[in-house]
Amino acid sequence: MGRVVGIDLGTTNSCIAVLEGGKPMIVPNAEGERVTRSIVALTDDGEYLVGKPAANQAVLNPRNTIFSAKRLMGRRYAEVPDVIRSVPYVVKAGPEDAARIELAGELIAPEEIGAKIIRKLVEDASSYLDDAITDAVITCPAYFNDAQRQATMNAGQIAGLNVLRILNEPTSAALAYGIDARQNERVLVFDLGGGTLDVSLLDVVEPICEVCATSGDTHLGGDDFDKCIVDWLAMEFLDKYGIDLRNESQALQRLTEAAEKAKCELSSVTSAKIELPFITSINGEGIHLEKIISREKFEVLSAGLLQRCVEPVLTTLKDARCQASKIDEVLLVGGGSRMPSIRKLVNDITLGKEPNMAISPEEVVALGAAVQAGIISGEFDQMVLLDVTPFSLGIETKGGKFHRMIARNTAIPTRATQLFTTGDHFQRGVDVVVLQGESKRAHNNRTLGRFGLEGIRNKVAGEAEIEVDFDIDEDGILSVTARDLGTGNKRQITIAGTAYLDQQEVKDKASQAQKLAAEKQQKQLANVERQQAEYVLSTVENQLEFIGQAVPNELRSKCEKAMSALRTALGDGAPPKKLSKLKVSLELAAEPLQQIES
Ligand code: AMP
């Protein structure tokens, strides 16, 4: 087995960590950065770029540059109108209304974008560590539902990894801190990433790290704060010039980048300048956009978003039956929590508790995931982690009611079995609708899947016995089984069939990705071979010229013959093996030149 890593697959940035000497450590990417932008682009030449190289060409290639794909993973098209409005690439409805991204005319699953990001992290880390990476713990927001978790798992598998665990991000952050502190503490984790807000309350009582409650908002993240600035700039521009820049994909991309940059600057200075020359043109004349935004203005624009951060914290505290004054430690996680307004808000809610940002908020989740990988692989056998399910799960019963089988914030893994019966005389089948949510009305909750159980023996209403079993594994992934106790008939639901890829597709895509990676490696190898062959060729050419008449005729013609063969092979684009062979022949032929030279 190769190295085991922790991966934070973020909406905006992703990060990979490994255990070195019992301590988690961030592994930098090939560009030397500790976090990698979660951006994937397809160039006109059909080449995939990931991270900074993809970000650098985003303005020129907005339709084929995919960011925030995590916001689409495991989601239905109808669930993501806000994402569709805010990105310049095209999102369409795929099979069973699953959100799909259009890239060069093809519809691809968002988890395939996730897989490309993971692959880059793993390939870069593997060459940095000079070791193979085979297994990983991958994190996801605690508030991710079953479909989103499964999509995260698929992304890891498509990238060719054995996914040891899908771990909640806030839990992961607490583990990163807990590994050193490990005192008896109640810890509030406030995690504002690019696309989601996660709040969790954990009890760290050595050696157990237990999640007491979790809440959040999957539609609230740093990107929304960027959007406030984008909307403000666009509205002012619309007023002045009558043009809505949000309808022009390149202009929208530039606006979004400038807004994010200004937002980040406003975390450390009180005003930021936004300059976008030639943002559009009117009657052939270029129009420039220049604006200064103060921190105060930004806080007014984002006041509504700030307000939305309050409820998940209060819900978490209420669910955990914990008063704000009883919190021992507040951990701020995610790049979004660098905003002073967020720090102040959390400080206010927790009655003046100073948040702990000792570990970089962008790195802490990956570090915790590496710790979890260590726990699973046996390196930290003393730590135990108890996580919870973020939603209530149940089935629909007569009259459109929601019957709860597992309450939210139940520790996982968990299992619940209950007996149900038929509502009508001689009913031959039942429809099992699996739901997730908190409403008593079934239609207000999210349908995870449905299946029928047929062949029930003729019985009067209330006599048949149908046993329904809900089983949630350590990754928070649910499977549901219904069994007719009269006949022994059994059906198990494959919830994974709804908004994401099925297992065969995941396997196909994983081998496709491996094939592409092998081709890429082959190409790189060919390039290296080519460069080396060209280098040897020019060295021998120079030697012959430098030594001149002193080269014996026989040796000169031997060298020239070998050079000519190599030149022809280079011209024909010969395979690396042949180039290598001809290069070695030339080196052997030219060996005596060195003695003459010296
Ligand atoms: P993460 O997913 O944790 O990398 O968080 C990404 C989000 O954090 C993005 O929306 C970034 O724009 C935001 N972010 C990063 N640095 C800062 C900063 N200094 N101030 C405000 N937001 C930031």
Image (cartoon, rainbow, N blue to C red):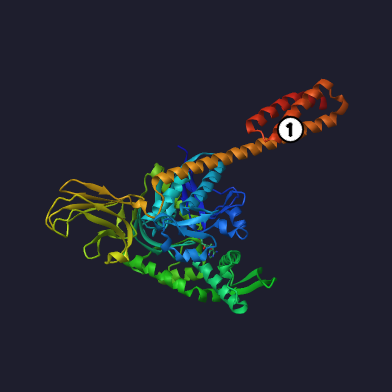
Of residue 462 and residue 555, the one placed in the foreground of this image is: 462
Residue 22: percent from left, percent from top: 46, 44
Q: Amino acid at mark 1?
A: Arg
Res 407 quadrant in image? bottom left
Q: Is residue 584 above or below residue 58?
A: above
* Residue to which mark 1 is pinned: 567
Q: Position of residue 478 (x, y in %)?
A: 32, 52
Tell me, yes or no, if residue 380 can be seen here. no
At horizontal 50% and vertical 44% (from top left) the residue drawn is 513
- Label 1: which secondary element: helix
Q: Residue furthest bottom?
A: 239
Q: Which quarter of the picture shows residue 294?
A: bottom right
Residue 355 drawn above or below residue 417 = below
Residue farthest toward the top in the current orientation of the protein: 554
Say whether mark 1 is within 8 Å of ligand 1.
Answer: no
Determine whether, in the image, residue 9 is placed left or right of residue 419.
Answer: right
Q: Position of residue 547 (x, y in %)?
A: 85, 29
Vertical placement of 28 versus 573: above or below?
A: below
Pick the residue in front: 15 or 431. Answer: 431
Numbered label tally: 1
Classify the position of the C terminus by image quarter.
top right
Residue nearer the viewer, 164 or 448: 448
**Which residue: 39% across, 45% down?**
503
Q: Residue at x 74, y 26 (%)?
A: 562
Residue 28 seen by the camera:
yes
Label 1 crowd (10 A; few <14 / some 14-19 / many >=20): some
From the top left corner, tell me how far across and down residue 74 is, in percent: 41, 56
Quadrant holding the N terminus: top left
Q: Is residue 64 above or below residue 586?
A: below
